[in-house]
Image: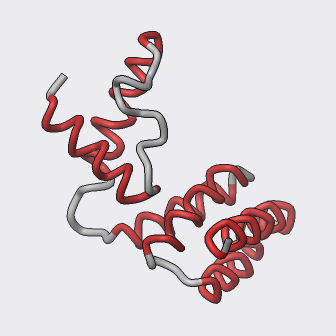
């Protein structure tokens, strides 16, 4: 394990979500090491940190994909992070929900809408 890469990945996770999502080596059970390594070292240290797209751009792409998959849980996580970081405001979130619903299907749009309401409520609390 490259400790600098792991620390960069964990820093990106904290930047995106406000905490390390239980991915710090001390918190992760040993059997999850391959998953944690791939997630922190590759997804966050490498992919999310690449030049060419902003964090906001990557969030929008991720939101579109997870909404199309019907993954309300992942959408809510992304939306909370985006709202807390100032990448999106509640009006933009509403526009995203409306737009995605027309391309990803109304049931997936409804799931995203529920995630958006929960995210806005969590950040506003």
Q: x%, y% of residue 49?
A: 25, 56
Which residue is most to the top?
31
Q: Quadrant of residue 41?
A: top left
Query: Which image quadrant: the C terminus?
Result: bottom right
* x and y, in percent, of residue 76 in the image: 65, 59
In the picture, measured across the screen, residue 40 lies left or right of residue 94, that is left
- Between 124 and 103, the residue placed more toward the observer is 124
* Image quadrant assignment for residue 58: bottom left
- Color theme of the render: secondary structure
Residue drawn at point x = 43 percent, y = 72 percent:
85
Residue that lies at the very extreme toward the bottom in this rendered image: 91
Q: Residue at x 59, y 57 (%)?
A: 65
41 left or right of 101 in image:
left
Instruction: Count the labels in the image.
Output: 0
Whether residue 94 is situated above or below residue 74 in the rendered picture: below
117 versus 70 height, above or below: below
In this view, 113 is above or below 17:
below
The residue at 47%/65% (across/down) is: 59
Point out residue 69 in the picture as x, y percentages from the top left corner: 69, 51
């Amino acid at each position: 394990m490259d400790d600098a890469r792991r620390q960069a990945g964990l820093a990106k996770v904290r930047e995106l979500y406000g905490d390390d999502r239980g991915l710090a080596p001390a918190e992760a059970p040993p059997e999850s090491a391959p998953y944690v390594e791939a997630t922190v070292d590759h997804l966050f240290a490498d992919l999310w940190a690449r030049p060419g797209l902003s964090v906001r751009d990557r969030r929008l792409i991720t939101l579109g994909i997870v909404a199309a998959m019907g993954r309300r849980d992942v959408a809510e996580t992304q939306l909370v992070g985006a709202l807390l970081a100032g990448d999106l405001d509640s009006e933009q979130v509403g526009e995203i929900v409306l737009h995605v619903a027309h391309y990803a299907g109304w049931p997936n749009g409804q799931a995203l809408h529920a995630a958006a309401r929960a995210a806005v409520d969590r950040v506003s609390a």
